[in-house]
Image (cartoon, rainbow, N blue to C red):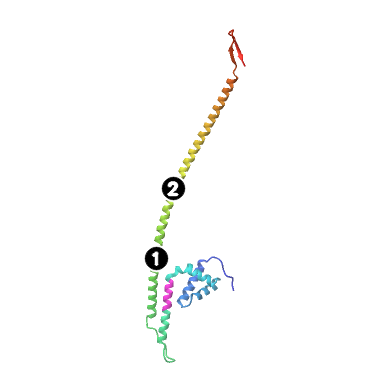
């Protein structure tokens, strides 16, 4: 027995699964038999094939499934008709089906298939329109968010510019205050170092320490 695959399903795997399952439906077989056959062909377990069919592949073949069921029903009806038309005695030639019966049955099957496909197409069209509206709403919301983001970015840039301007002004003010403080300190020190004089009784100036 070959090793069981664990890799992702490919488009070819899905196609084989659909073809074999539809054939088993047409022939009146069970889906389990179909999954076993597919598993042997592509190296997967029947359970994995069944899960893949029910979860992903089946919804893409609803119209084909309806057609396969109609063909299965036709096969069963034709078998019943053959049994009814079978001769009672041995050796008698079997009666032929009425002319055009097989062709009319095929046409009926095609009509049912087309009706089922029309319903599927209409449903898909509704889903497409709904998705288109949802996409348009998302695009409009995205455009609004982009506009809001641009406005916020401009506000942030303006605040940053103002902050840098205020910071520069504050630094300049600190420098001015520091120079003024130094100048005041030097003036005070110069005043203290400046010699002081007073006049004596004779009118002469003398230095006061």
Along the polypeptide, which appears first: circle 1 or circle 2? 1
Image quadrant where residue 183 sits: top right
Could you tell me what secondary structure mostly forms the magenta stretch? Answer: helix
Q: Is label 2 in a helix, a strand or a loop? A: helix
Question: Does 140 sit above or below residue 47?
Answer: above
Of labels 1 and 2, the one closer to you: 2
The quadrant of the picture occupied by the N terminus is bottom right
Question: Does 95 sit above or below residue 201?
Answer: below
The quadrant of the picture occupied by the C terminus is top right
The answer to which of 28 and 163 lies nearer the viewer is: 163
Can you give x and y, in whole percent of width and height, for residue 206 in the image?
A: 61, 12
Can you give x and y, in whole percent of width and height, for residue 54 in the image?
A: 48, 69
Q: Residues within 10 Å of mark 1 (few under 14, many from 20)?
A: few
Question: Does 56 sit above or below residue 26?
Answer: above
The answer to which of 107 and 140 lies nearer the viewer is: 140
Residue at the spot 46% in from the left edge and 73% down from the top edge? 22
Q: Circle 1 is placed at which residue position?
A: 123
Q: Residues within 10 Å of mark 2 (few under 14, many from 20)?
A: few
Residue at the far right in the pictured view: 209
Cα gap from disc 1 to disc 2, whole angstroms: 37 Å
Residue at the far top in the pictured view: 202
Can you give x and y, in whole percent of width and height, for residue 179 in the image?
A: 55, 28
Q: Circle 2 is placed at which residue position?
A: 148
The answer to which of 156 and 201 lies nearer the viewer is: 201
Residue at the far front in the pictured view: 201
Left or right: 49 as drawn, with respect to 121: right
Residue at the spot 43% in from the left edge and 77% down from the top edge? 72
Number of the label disc, if any, that sits on residue 208: none
82 in the magenta segment: no
Question: Does 16 sit above or below residue 209?
Answer: below
The magenta stretch spans which residues?
Answer: 64-73
Residue at the spot 52% in from the left edge and 31% down from the top edge? 173
């Amino acid at each position: 027995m070959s090793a069981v695959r664990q890799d992702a399903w490919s488009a070819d795997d899905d196609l084989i699964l659909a073809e074999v399952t539809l054939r088993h439906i047409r022939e009146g077989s069970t889906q389990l038999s179909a999954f076993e056959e597919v598993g042997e062909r592509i190296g997967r377990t029947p359970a994995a094939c069944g899960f893949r069919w029910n979860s992903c592949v089946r919804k893409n073949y609803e119209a084909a499934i309806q057609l396969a069921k109609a063909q299965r029903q036709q096969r069963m009806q034709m078998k019943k008709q053959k049994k009814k038309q079978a001769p009672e005695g041995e050796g008698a030639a079997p009666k032929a089906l009425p002319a055009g019966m097989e062709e009319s049955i095929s046409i009926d099957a095609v009509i049912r298939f087309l009706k089922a496909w029309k319903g599927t197409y209409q449903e898909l069209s509704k889903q497409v329109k709904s998705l288109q509206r949802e996409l348009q709403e998302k695009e409009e919301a995205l455009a609004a968010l982009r506009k809001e983001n641009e406005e916020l970015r401009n506000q942030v840039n303006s605040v940053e510019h103002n902050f840098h301007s205020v910071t520069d002004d504050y630094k300049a003010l600190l420098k001015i205050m520091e120079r003024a403080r130094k100048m005041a300190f030097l003036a005070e020190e110069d005043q203290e170092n400046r010699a002081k004089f007073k006049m004596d009784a004779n009118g002469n100036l003398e230095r006061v320490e």
